[in-house]
């Protein structure tokens, strides 16, 4: 049995808001981690913390890149679906689009 894709605009807006908050918190953690490393870790000990810091920076960066990718993907799909939705709704023979209420 195929699963239906039901799109709830409020749910999608909430998901997007949560993804954006997660990306911003990851960005803040990158800044905090770098400042912590610069201020509190002596230069001689940086090599011993290298693996931990690198792993954390890669993880936070992956969250940010994931947010940017999914946001771009959602935006492109929204534009494609919007064009497809109004593609066949012509008003006259000349090909002028029928302007519905709420359509820009």
Image (tube, rainbow, N blue to C red):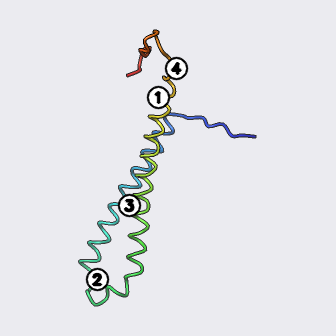
Label 1 crowd bin: few (<14), some (14–19), many (20+), radius 10 Å = few
Numbered label attached to residue 83: 1
The residue singled out by tag 2 in the image is 41
Residue mark closest to the camera, 2 vs 1: 1
Quarter of the rendering occupied by the C terminus: top left
Label 2 crowd bin: few (<14), some (14–19), many (20+), radius 10 Å = few
* Percent of width and height locating residue 79: 44, 34
The residue singled out by tag 4 in the image is 88
- Residue under the point 41% across and 21% down: 103
Q: CA distance from mark 2 to mark 3?
A: 21 Å
Upstream in sequence: badge 2 or badge 1: 2
Numbered label attached to residue 6: none
Q: CA distance from mark 3 to mark 4?
A: 43 Å
Which image quadrant for residue 16?
top left
Question: Residue furthest toward the top?
Answer: 92
Q: CA distance from mark 2 to mark 1?
A: 54 Å
Query: Viewer-proximal residue, 5 or 33?
Result: 5
The residue singled out by tag 3 in the image is 26
* Percent of width and height locating residue 7: 56, 35
Label 3 crowd bin: few (<14), some (14–19), many (20+), radius 10 Å = many
Callout 3: helix, strand or loop? helix
Upstream in sequence: badge 2 or badge 4: 2
Residue mark closest to the camera, 3 vs 4: 4
Asked if one can make out residue 100 in the rendered structure from this viewpoint, the answer is: no
Q: CA distance from mark 3 to mark 1?
A: 34 Å
Q: CA distance from mark 2 to mark 4?
A: 63 Å
* Percent of width and height locating residue 41: 28, 82
């Amino acid at each position: 049995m195929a699963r239906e894709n039901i799109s709830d605009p409020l749910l999608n807006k909430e998901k997007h808001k949560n993804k954006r908050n997660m990306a911003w918190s990851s960005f803040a953690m990158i800044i905090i981690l770098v400042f912590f490393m610069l201020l509190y870790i002596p230069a001689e000990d940086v090599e011993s913390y290298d693996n931990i810091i690198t792993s954390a920076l890669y993880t936070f960066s992956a969250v940010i890149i994931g947010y940017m990718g999914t946001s771009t993907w959602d935006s492109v799909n929204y534009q494609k679906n919007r064009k497809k939705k109004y593609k066949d709704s012509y008003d006259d023979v000349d090909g002028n689009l029928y302007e519905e209420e709420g359509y820009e």
